[in-house]
Image (cartoon, rainbow, N blue to C red):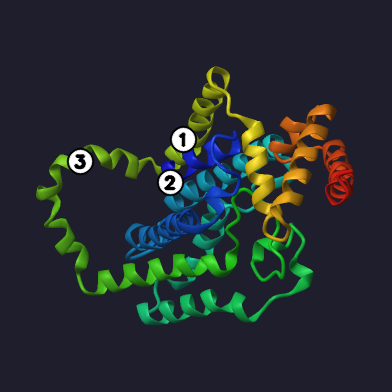
Amino acid sequence: MAVYHFTWDLEFFGYVARGTTGQGGWRLFARAIASSFLFLAGVSLVLAHGREIRWRPFWTRWLQVAGGAAAITVATYFATPGSFVFFGILHEIAVASLVALLFLRLPWFVTALAAAAVLALPHFVALPALNTRWLAWIGLFERPPISNDFVPVFPWLGAVLLGVAAGRLATDHRLWDRLRGLNPRLARAAPLTWLGRHTLLFYLLHQPLLMAVVWLATQVAPPDLSARFQDDCRRQCLASQSEALCANYCGCAERELDARGIMDSVMAGAGEQSARDALEEVVRLCSFEALDPQ
């Protein structure tokens, strides 16, 4: 998780190409991280409430997770208002933990079937009425909203239920007793258990610290925004246009953005309305110039 977020920070500040962490192996890496988080959340529910639900510890932990989710929403709303985290991994864990309580006493195969249904549902049901950001968290939308971290209930609740099913299966077959037998062999790794016992704290603190480190690097060795802009612009343009036209268009766009003083804003996502309006004007102007460079 820290490796992925550090790379995302490098992309955000312009040290790596835009879109790097949202495609290819990085995209699969992110999904694997989220899936493991949610799966382990389900397993942990079984371990914490194996025989009966311990309501006081449950609500204490749930309020911590929900509070962390709310803090992330508020912080990202001010930091990146156009793509703030309105339903991320902690929001999903908070909601899924409540739903998963209904499955703690059911046979593991029943929970596994429910997990499969949850995972499959978004592939068969998509409602345009759920496209708005305030309803998209359900996960049955036609078009996903823009967010730096979006983990809707469907299909991600399925990963938590799979964790509950696996935990229930392990309990029924006394697998936990066998795993405890490995503890002496893993004694050297004992210091790592601190992270396992303070996962929420680590999650909330690691990204601000990593982002601060990258920001400090920009003060010493700032990224070459011009080179990054040309790379991003040409890559997108060449998907549908010729090399010559893209060279003219991207050269024009860079000159115009610099002249208007909005290059930094555009490279940061053009969150302000004035910057977006200016960007649209530059796109129109340079599109005509690229088609008729004379």
183 to the left or right of 278: left
Evaluate whether residue 84 shows in this view. no
Kind of element beneath mark 2? loop
Q: Position of residue 27 (x, y in %)?
A: 50, 56
Report the disc number at residue 236: none
Disc 2 marks which residue? Answer: 1
Among all residues in the image, which is located at the extreme top?
220
> Gap in Å between the C-alphas at discs 3 and 2?
20 Å
Q: Are marks 3 and 2 in contact (CB under 8 Å)?
A: no
> Gap in Å between the C-alphas at discs 1 and 3?
21 Å
Question: In this rendering, is residue 149 above or below 125?
Answer: above
Q: Of residues 283 and 133, which is closer to you in this image?
A: 283
Q: Position of residue 230 (x, y in %)?
A: 67, 40
Q: Earlier in the sequence, mark 3 or mark 2?
A: 2
Question: In this rendering, is residue 132 above or below 14?
Answer: below
Q: Earlier in the sequence, mark 2 or mark 1?
A: 2
Q: Position of residue 251 (x, y in %)?
A: 75, 39
Kind of element beneath mark 1? helix
Residue at x-position 66% and y-position 61%: 137
Disc 1 marks which residue? Answer: 206
Residue at x-position 46% and y-position 41%: 203
Disc 3 marks which residue? Answer: 190
Q: Are marks 2 and 1 in contact (CB under 8 Å)?
A: yes
106 to the left or right of 183: right
Which marked residue is nearer to the observer: mark 1 or mark 3? 1
Three-letter amino acid code at the position of disc 2: Met
Question: In this rendering, is residue 15 above or below 171?
Answer: above
